[in-house]
Image (cartoon, rainbow, N blue to C red):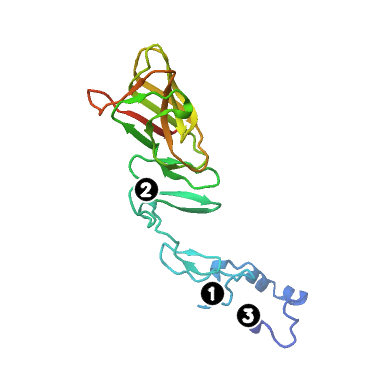
């Protein structure tokens, strides 16, 4: 506009931009106001008219290449990451997973051990790997039962000390190769913690049973518990059978698994 103005203004001419000047130079005004953007003279290599956070303006000079993008601060930058989840550096071993750990937050869950399953930690916690079987203990020889009350019951199997979280529901199972009550009497088998009876799994009143299986479902409190299998009779002597395995007789065992 400066060069055009100097070329068209002479002494005594009306003020540039005034009604009289516009009328006298209508063709020039039309040419200027109707000029297409791509008909303008090439711009200088400077940033005078670039857009800023304070006002509109022109696009910064292109950086070249095919992978960069224009950031909000007006600079060209390469996108972060590799662009391929298959080669992301977060993976360290086969079986690794990525999971949410909170609002807009995530982290790697390392692979568990063979046989574990992925268990939800609930809405307020991350998922975790867990084993279906929590405890297992067995006996390979017969147990004679002579105790006559639950309070003095004879121990068949003692489990291991296990820490529970107070929320996990478990199933405690007992299996015996055979159970023989005293003649004409009954035999009762229960799950105990120390001397406290938790629940009864078998009550037998006949001459003998093979492949006995009983179970009890409960939610242990948040603490370390050791569960036992015990039995007592009305009178006389009963037998809970167990063997070394194979064709002779299966071991008697107690197994604790997650029910939920």
Image point (35%, 46%), residue name: 95
Q: Residue at x 51, y 65 (%)?
A: 70
Give coordinates of residue 69: x percent, y percent.
Answer: 48, 63
Q: Is residue 127 visible?
A: yes
Q: Nearer the viewer, mark 3 or mark 1?
A: 1
Q: Position of residue 21 (x, y in %)?
A: 74, 77
Element type at marker 2? loop
Considering every residue shown, the one lying at the far bottom of the view is: 11
Spot occupied by residue 183 in the image (x, y as percentages of width and height): 37, 12
Tell me the tag on residue 41. 1
Task: Answer above or below: position of 82 versus 64.
Answer: above
Tags 1 and 2 in contact by the CB under 8 Å rule?
no
Chain-order first, disc 1 or disc 2: 1
**How far apart are the alpha carbons under marks 1 and 2?**
63 Å
The numbered mark, 3 or 1, whose residue comes first in the sequence reads 3
Residue 209: x, y in percent? Answer: 35, 16
Question: Which corner quadrant holds the N terminus?
Answer: bottom right
Quick one: 9 or 164, which is closer to the camera?
Answer: 164
Q: CA distance from mark 3 to mark 1?
A: 13 Å
The label on residue 111 is 2
* Res 212 → quadrant: top left
Q: Secondary structure at mark 3?
A: helix
Nearer the observer, 91 or 59:
91
Dot 2: within a 10 Å radius of its alpha carbon, few (fewer than 14), some, or many (20 or more) residues?
some
Q: Nearer the viewer, mark 3 or mark 2?
A: 2
Could you tell me which secondary element the residue under label 1 belongs to? Answer: loop
Q: CA distance from mark 3 to mark 2?
A: 74 Å
Looking at the image, can residue 259 be seen?
no
Residue 4: mark in rendering? 3
């Amino acid at each position: 506009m400066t060069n055009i103005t100097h070329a068209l203004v002479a002494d005594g001419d009306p003020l540039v931009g005034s009604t009289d000047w516009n009328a006298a130079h209508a063709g020039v005004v039309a040419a200027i106001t109707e000029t297409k953007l791509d008909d303008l003279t090439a711009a200088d290599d400077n940033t005078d008219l670039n857009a800023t956070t304070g006002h509109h303006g022109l696009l910064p000079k292109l950086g070249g290449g095919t992978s960069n993008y224009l950031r909000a601060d007006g600079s060209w930058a390469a996108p972060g990451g590799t662009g391929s989840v298959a080669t992301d550096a977060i993976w360290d071993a086969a079986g690794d997973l990525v999971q949410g750990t909170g609002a807009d937050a995530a982290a790697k869950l390392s692979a568990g051990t063979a046989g574990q399953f992925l268990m939800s930690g609930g809405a307020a916690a991350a998922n975790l790997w867990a084993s279906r079987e929590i405890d297992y203990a067995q006996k390979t020889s017969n147990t004679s039962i002579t105790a006559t009350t639950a309070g003095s019951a004879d121990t068949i199997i003692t489990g291991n000390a296990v820490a529970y979280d107070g929320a996990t529901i478990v199933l405690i199972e007992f299996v015996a190769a055979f159970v023989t009550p005293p003649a004409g009497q009954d035999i009762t088998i229960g799950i105990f913690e120390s001397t406290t009876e938790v629940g009864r799994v078998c009550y037998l009143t006949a001459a003998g049973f093979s492949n006995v299986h009983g179970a009890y479902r409960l939610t242990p409190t948040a603490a370390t518990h050791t569960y036992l299998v015990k039995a007592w009779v009305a009178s006389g002597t009963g037998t809970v059978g167990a063997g070394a395995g194979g064709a002779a007789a299966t071991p008697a065992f107690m197994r604790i698994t997650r029910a939920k």
